[in-house]
Image (tube, rainbow, N blue to C red):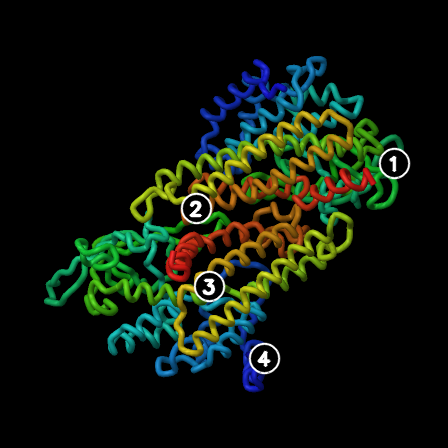
Amino acid sequence: MDFNFTEEQSMVRDSVASFLQDKYDFDTRRKIVSSDAGWRADYWKAFAEELGILGASFSEELGGLGGGAIDNMIIMEEFGKALVIEPYLGTVVIGGGFMKHSGYAGAASVIEGIVGGSATIAFAYAEPQARYTWQDLKTTAKKDGSGWVLNGHKAVVIGAPFATHLIVTARTGGAQRDAGGVGVFIIDKSLPGVVTRDYPTVDGNRASEVYFENVSIPADALISESGLALVEQVMDEAIAAVGAEAVGVLRKLHEGTLDYAKQRKQFGTSIANFQVLQHRMVDMFIEVEQSVSMTYMATIKVGESAAERAKAVSAMKVRIGRACKFVGQNAIQIHGGMGMTDELAIGHYFKRATMIEGLFGSVDHHLKRYESLSFDAAA
Amino acid sequence: MNLDFSPEDLAFRDEVRAFIAENYPAGLRDKQEEGEEMAKEDFLSWHRVLAKKGWVAPAWPEKFGGPGWTSVQRYIWSEETARADCVPILPFGINMVGPVIYTFGTPEQKERFLPATLSGDIWWSQGYSEPGAGSDLASLKTKAERFTGDDGKEYYLVNGQKTWTTMAQHGDWIFCLVRTDPNAKIQEGISFLLIDMKSPGVTVRPIITLGGEHEVNEVWLENVKVPVENRIYEENKGWTCAKFLLAHERSGIAGVARSKRGIERIRQIASTELSDDGDSLIKDPMFKRKVAELEIDLTALEYTELRTLAGEASGKGPGPESSVLKIKGTEIQQRITELVLEAAGHYGAPYFRGFPTDGDNAHPIGPDFAHRAAPTYFNVRKTSIYGGSNEIQRNIIAKMVLGL
């Protein structure tokens, strides 16, 4: 049993943490969120060149530093603590994940772009009717000579406004909800016929509705013609990474609440002396610790068989979802009116926690997935 | 025991229903349906219609301009206005300061303030909370020092800061608790003052909340001169008014009728939204169960409120039992917003200040209900904090009901 990190991993954590401490304090983050661009392209460049973290999770053959899911976990947790907006999840975890696992011919050059900071990726998978069912697709990719023609509408594509590339799921065959015929493509966002409508999200991020209007894409855009298993693998890794981000967010919610309760006085004493609040903060602590454990467990298991991996990840997402709600709501409650203000950081952590709760599947969705994997399969 | 409405009550319900159908401002309904933010005039338009009809203050005695309804009729009224999604009548004048004035005010104060409160000519703000006080209301620090003006009249010089003042950006007058005797025990030496917000020295600053709304404010009082005749009840006895007002505030706080409408709305939303398996969300066993549990809990709250109402009708004032209504009522309101956000799925994330097609009619973003789902969820976290936090309400029950 060893839950320790390697020296390299500890170095990655320290360098990310110290960069964010210097350059991503809450006021700076607020300015980034309200700026026209909505992110800091120069920080992205610094992630690539100064910190080298965009390559941390890729093997050395692919131009990376030789890490993997644990490196993503470490980085995402630190990003959670600072509420970082920049698209690490979409670009490195998801975009990079597709490149690593697909055997896609263009993978090396895309990864080179990711590691160097020139390629940013958003994953356009959700559709308005589909909820969290990845294979429910009305978007179609039809063969056209050697290439394809793409038509459809993708919902709430997080990070699309910052992306140079989109990874898109589209039906290459079969009916709307079939497991087969789920095509995966990588396209340049600037292709003619790609129409985006950008907007902010409630947690300060940016997203787009993406419309494909007879978009002609070349043959080499195809990552997989029937890639549902690939999508599931990459999404499970993404969910594990989001769990790590949640851990960062939850730690800050809990710490911030403890600090506030100690300094806030009411009825002539610090409110941290009230037993009802002490027990509440203990329960929050328990939720945070269990979230950390589940994130480690899921991150370790992302490399196992599809069924093991999915079960581990869904179990984690259920716990994390509940922790986000419990810790988030109680952080606001214990802060009282101050917790309701836009001015304090605590509310912004609560908003991110709330969005993570629903991201890549709600508690109910993952509970059902877990149930079917752990009961139906055995029956 | 008989829980049926009498024929007279049913006739009253029909009359109310017809009145709302004919008189609720159409423009207001459109604005609500499109999820637009309400302006001052929007709140006042329905208020004025009701004032003209004599229905704006259901709980007021007839001699001060109330309709003389029974508690059952008042219950029917709140049911019907919620059912029709009517914009709520702001409570600060009608439910809070109005009853304080007709109970504790002088004949001159009643004459001066009650008709203008009913008509909507005075927009009241509440100056109770202070920074650092929260639910510990009696720790308030705003000072009012008595002096004789150059005109020979008696005044208070008021200095301090109030906070969480809802809709104070529109306020004409503010009712404040102020400390008139700094040496008295903590709940003594407090007075209840009415302050004209146009007085020099009154500054209102916005507080933006989690959902992005400008709903609450800070109110700064710097050397504000307030005539002594604007004090309600005796000097240093303001706590009596304060407690009276809080009991009134809590009695309306359960929001049963609004929550019923909220659950009905969830059912509507979930019958058009799809679940993961492609069927309607309301058929999803997990979602359905949560709605069912909510309905059952709301039923328990409703019958608890009815028992409280029946007690009031037989002469018992709203007592510490109203804390039960506050706790359960606000928890249910919060759970409703959780389920609406859950129903929104991915479309809970987009954030728009106005309507989501602003500036681009070609592609509306997500279902109509979804763009307010997250901001409302965030905003409604306040209900377990304000009006005496739910932790404080539990303390009240422990002390006053259970004798602990």
Q: Is residue B158 above or below residue B114?
A: above
**Gap between marks 1 and 2 measured at Cα:** 64 Å
Q: Which residue is under mark 1?
A: A143
Question: Residue shown at 68%/50% (left/top)?
Answer: B363
Question: Residue shown at 43%/67% (left/top)?
Answer: B251
Q: Which residue is under mark 4?
A: B4
Q: How many marks?
A: 4
**Which chain contains the residue that carries disc 1?**
A
Please, what secondary structure does the residue beneath circle 1 have?
strand
Foreground disc of the pair 1, 4: 4
Q: Is residue A48 left or right of residue B120?
A: right
- Asked whether the viewer can see residue A166, the reply is no
Foreground disc of the pair 3, 1: 3
Q: Nearer the viewer, residue A335 or B142?
A: A335
Q: Is residue A240 above or below residue A280?
A: above
Q: Which residue is under mark 2?
A: A276
The amino acid beneath tag 1 is: Lys
The amino acid beneath tag 3 is: Ile
Task: Work out which quarter of the rendered image holds the C terminus of chain A and state it.
Answer: top right
The amino acid beneath tag 2 is: Val
Q: Which mark is residue B253?
A: 3
Give percent across and percent down for residue A108.
74, 19
**Which chain contains the residue that carries disc 3?**
B
**Residue at the front extreme, as displayed:** B403
Please, what secondary structure does the residue beneath circle 4 have?
loop
**Which chain contains the residue that carries disc 2?**
A
Instruction: Work out whether mark 1 precedes mark 2 in sequence or the reverse, and give the earlier one.
Output: 1
Q: Nearer the viewer, residue B112 or A336?
A: A336
How packed mark 2 is, by other alpha carbons closer than 10 Å (few <14, some 14-19, many 20 or more), is few
Task: Work out which quarter of the rendered image holds the N terminus of chain A and state it.
Answer: top right
